[in-house]
Image (cartoon, helix red, strand yellow):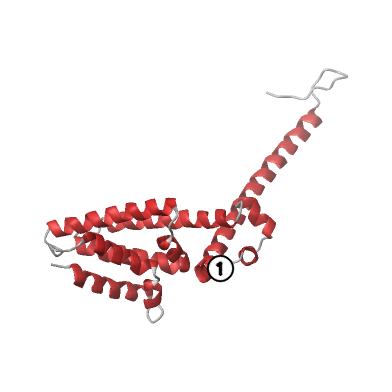
Amino acid sequence: MFVIMNRSSGSVNAQNVLYWLQMTDVTQTTKRAERADSVANRDRILQAAREEFGAHGLNAEVSDIAARAGVGVGTLYRHFENRDGLLTALMQAIQADMGKGVQAAMTAGDPSSIVRELIHSMAEICQRNGALVDVLLSSRGADLKRLQSSFSEVFGGMLKQGIEQGAFRQDLDTSVATEVFRSFFAAGGSTALAANCPHAEAADAFADFFLAAIKA
């Protein structure tokens, strides 16, 4: 155990030990508080950015994001190197949400139910993120192209399974159907429909339309 010795007597100075322990505790508590405060600031910045980019798309201003988060622009840049870094962090969060939505939808049962659940999941993501989803689905960046390719593979595979099971039309072009599905959300179709009704109803309306076109 670490102790502090009194150099003149060679004995332990109890007051010095107590002081050191108290200062160590204060330092550790301060560091924990600083870390917690840093995490809270980052979360507020991300939420504010989600709202600003969701409302204004790529036209959102960093100063407006910082003001909405209740922090200075300098604090924002301590967490994110630049505007693109902030946007990338948001895109990664949305990608994760999409992945969870696809996984959950795949447990819905029959192919038609999977399609409906997936549409509802995408509609919820659109509701939470607004124009950010349009940016994500229409982007041509390398990482996002991989995401789109992965989604197309999974969705196309599900459609092919539905064809094999007799749920979907035998002459269904799965690549075209997949692109129609992606384009609906990329072009803001879910948000546009939800302008006149709740997102859940808008999701059901598109699901009814899409399934009517592909069902056997």
Nearer to me, 58 or 50: 58
In the picture, measured across the screen, residue 112 lies left or right of residue 9, that is left
Q: Residue at left 61%, top 66%? A: 61
Q: Residue at left 66%, top 48%? A: 34
Nearer to me, 106 or 187: 187
- Looking at this view, name the residue that lies furthest to the right: 8
In the picture, measured across the screen, residue 61 lies left or right of residue 104, that is right
Give the residue at mark 1: 59
Q: Residue at left 33%, top 64%? A: 182
User: Residue 62 location, x and y as percent?
Assistant: 62, 63
User: Residue 152 location, x and y as percent?
Assistant: 30, 56
Tally of numbered discs: 1
- Looking at this view, name the residue that lies furthest to the bottom: 196
User: Residue 103 location, x and y as percent?
Assistant: 31, 54
Callout 1 amino acid = Asn
User: Residue 124 location, x and y as percent?
Assistant: 39, 66
Quarter holding residue 83: bottom right
Quarter holding residue 23: top right
Q: Residue at left 41%, top 64%? A: 125
The C terminus - image quarter: bottom left
Q: Residues within 10 Å of mark 1 (few under 14, many from 20)?
A: few
Query: Tag 1's secondary structure?
Result: helix
The N terminus - image quarter: top right
